[in-house]
Amino acid sequence: MDARVALIGAGALGASVAEQLVRSGVGHVVIVDRDVVEESNLGRQSLYVEADAAARLPKAVALRQHLLAFNPTVDVVARVADVRADTIDDLLEEPDLVIDGTDNFATRYLLNDWCVREDVPWIYGGCVGARGLSAVIIPGETPCLRCLFRDPPPPGSVETCETTGIIAPAATMIAALEVAEALKLLVGDARSVRRGYISVDLWPFRVASVGSESKPDADCPTCGRRQFVFLEGGARDRVVTYCGRDAVQVIPAGRRTVNLASLCERLADVGDVSTNGFALTLRVPQHEITVFDDGRALIRGTRDPAHARVLYDRYVGS
Ligand SMILES: [Zn+2]
């Protein structure tokens, strides 16, 4: 297949998507990911091995190597980068289709803006615990992400893979749902594409298909009124680096309120966590993360803004 697919995120979901795409004959894949392989990933992220974690290889690079190992003819580009409003144009390389393998809403809303603006179909996939959700978004034909869910959830209000965990079958299942629809689009059979969104819980088992008849919302800020606030940076996280203090502050744009008590409960199994009512402090190996109730976080143990964002999304959510 000659089509170009851009895959954003190479974690549990993205790695499984990449494997299925390449085994299905998709010949050109751009993989964008900002993180490195860690030992704790190996229980749920397909293809990665101990040696990747020992070498702390970037996920995009490791994934590319594993894909080439079973199909040396495939054209795979690995981009080790953070997808942001100011980088997204360069990173995606004019794809025919974008597939979501991310673990955070900030990136998904940015992707939605970009894909609607550029008239490129994209496939939303997300999972946490034993459940997940997927939707196919064809600009102008189907509801976009903001037609379905107008605003991203506030930080700290939803479970993340790190606070709840994720079981491997959930990631593989959502990846399979994404790739099946991707293949229909790539062979030009858009009529067979599943409409609306599907939500599946494996434990206990429950499946729901929602909005299969729905159309784009004329009043949607993104696809109706064509206002791309996430691309314009108005809704993007701002990141400030503190020189010499080995700490980075992540400041989410806009006024947000974090319920520190409930975030504290969700992080109880992740590390040593406490809150004094004004701020929450989480200690995990190598990092100490302080979250304030306005959504701001101070991340100690790194000077790298991109890594700080990874840690923010992982523990606070976005
Ligand atoms: Zn819309």
Image (tube, grey):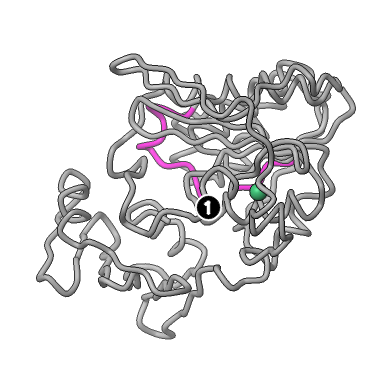
User: Where is residue 36 drawn, in percent x and y?
Assistant: 50, 47
**148 falls in the magenta region:** no
Residue drawn 74% across and 50% down?
A: 116
Residue in the image at 43% along x and 22% along y:
200
Depth check, front residue: 224 or 46: 224
Disc 1 crowd rating (10 Å Cα; few below 14, some 14-19, many 20+) is: few
| Left or right of residue 261, residue 97 in this image | right
Q: Which residue is mark 1?
A: 150
Residue closest to the eye, 64 or 203:
203
Q: Which span of residues is magenta-colored? A: 30-45
Q: Where's residue 256, x and y in %?
A: 36, 69
Q: What's under tag 1, amino acid-wise?
A: Arg
In this rendering, position of residue 46 left or right of residue 113:
left
Q: If the image is split into quadrants, where does the N terminus sit?
A: top right
- Residue 225: x and y in percent read 72, 60
Residue 300 location, quadrant? bottom left
Residue 131 on image: x %, y % = 39, 27
Q: In this rendered view, identify the residue nearer to me: 150 or 58.
A: 150
In magenta segment, residue 41: yes
Total numbered circles = 1
Q: Which residue corresponds to the image point at 32% horizontal and 44% vertical from the top-left?
A: 159
| Drawn side of residue 301 relative to residue 8, left or right | left
Q: Is residue 127 above or below residue 229?
A: above
Q: Is residue 142 above or below residue 294?
A: above
Residue positioned most to the right:
2
Q: Quadrant of residue 72?
A: top right
The C terminus - image quarter: bottom left
Label 1: element kind = loop
Query: Would you place residue 220 above or below residue 176 in this image?
Result: below
Give the residue furthest to the front. Answer: 218
